[in-house]
Amino acid sequence: MEMIPNCDSHIPVPGHPCHLVRRSRAGSPGTVERAPPDHVRAVGARRARRRDGDRAGRSRELSPSPTALDDAFRELLGEGRLDELHAAVIRAELAGELSELQALTWQATLALCEHSVLALDYLEMAEAIAVSEHERAMVAEHLAIYDLVSGDPRGAAERCLAALAHGRQTEGLWLNLLVALAGMGELDALDAVLRCLARLERNCTALLVERMCAEPALDAVCARPAFRPLLDCRAAV
């Protein structure tokens, strides 16, 4: 998860007006399904490509190299090998390779894949121990995914906007916001977000465009006219 600069904008999500201000740089229990929901698999794999360290909440490079642990977790999640991923997360935490917060968010991802009510419990525990802005943004991303998987795109959009309004700028928050708005059919708000992304720093926009193009849930978004200027930003990098 990368912390990225904000932009000056007003995104008119119905029922939740939210001003983004410029930030200074620096399922039901009992049924276990082994195939992860598509959005959990896609977002989990996307996030596993990025290191979750940075306990101090510093701004990160936009293209950090994945670790061997990230690669292993991503592969297990993408292939639906959840028992193996669960065991790997436990081993990594015991070995000190994962922080408590990282372990909780991975456990929440596993619980979401299994349609377990424990997912929200894990996320609430993670929210309680998050200290830095980076950690709070990380938890907000996972909570937004929980909302999306639970069929509440409006809740996911409001959660992402609340985090963005507090200067917690991350790739995942922007992408989850786009998925949520697309799910609600809020096309005006969706286009407003796309215009906002065009005003981020060019390398940030290029990264987001790359990830959007790789996200099946955003295929329709990438086909919108408001997305075309973002392609120009990526080409210019």
Image (tube, rainbow, N blue to C red):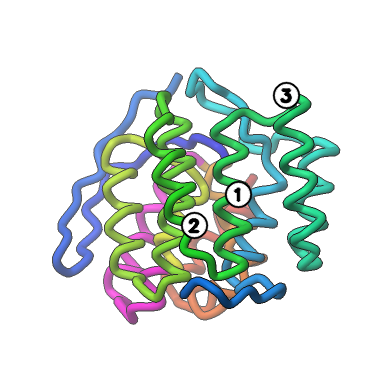
N-term mark: 3 or 2: 3
Instruction: Identify residue for label 2.
Output: 118
Q: Is residue 136 above or below residue 54?
A: below
Q: Is residue 12 above or below residue 46?
A: below
Pick whichever, 172 or 105, lies toward us. Answer: 105
Residue 192 is inside the magenta segment: yes
Disc 1 marks a residue whose amino acid type is Gln
Local crowd size for mark 1, using a 10 Å CA cut-off: few (<14), some (14–19), many (≥20): many
Q: Which residues are magenta?
A: 180-201
Mark 3 to mark 2 CA distance (whole Å): 23 Å
Local crowd size for mark 2, using a 10 Å CA cut-off: few (<14), some (14–19), many (≥20): some
Query: Which label is found at residue 96?
Result: 3
At numbered mark 3, what does the secondary structure look like: helix, strand or loop?
Answer: loop
In percent of width and height, residue 163 lies at: 32, 44
In percent of width and height, residue 71 lies at: 82, 46
Mark 1 to mark 3 CA distance (whole Å): 16 Å
Residue 174 is inside the magenta segment: no
Instruction: Identify residue for label 1.
Output: 107
In percent of width and height, residue 131 lies at: 40, 24
At numbered mark 1, what does the secondary structure look like: helix, strand or loop?
Answer: helix
In percent of width and height, residue 46 lies at: 66, 55
Q: Quadrant of the N terminus?
A: top right
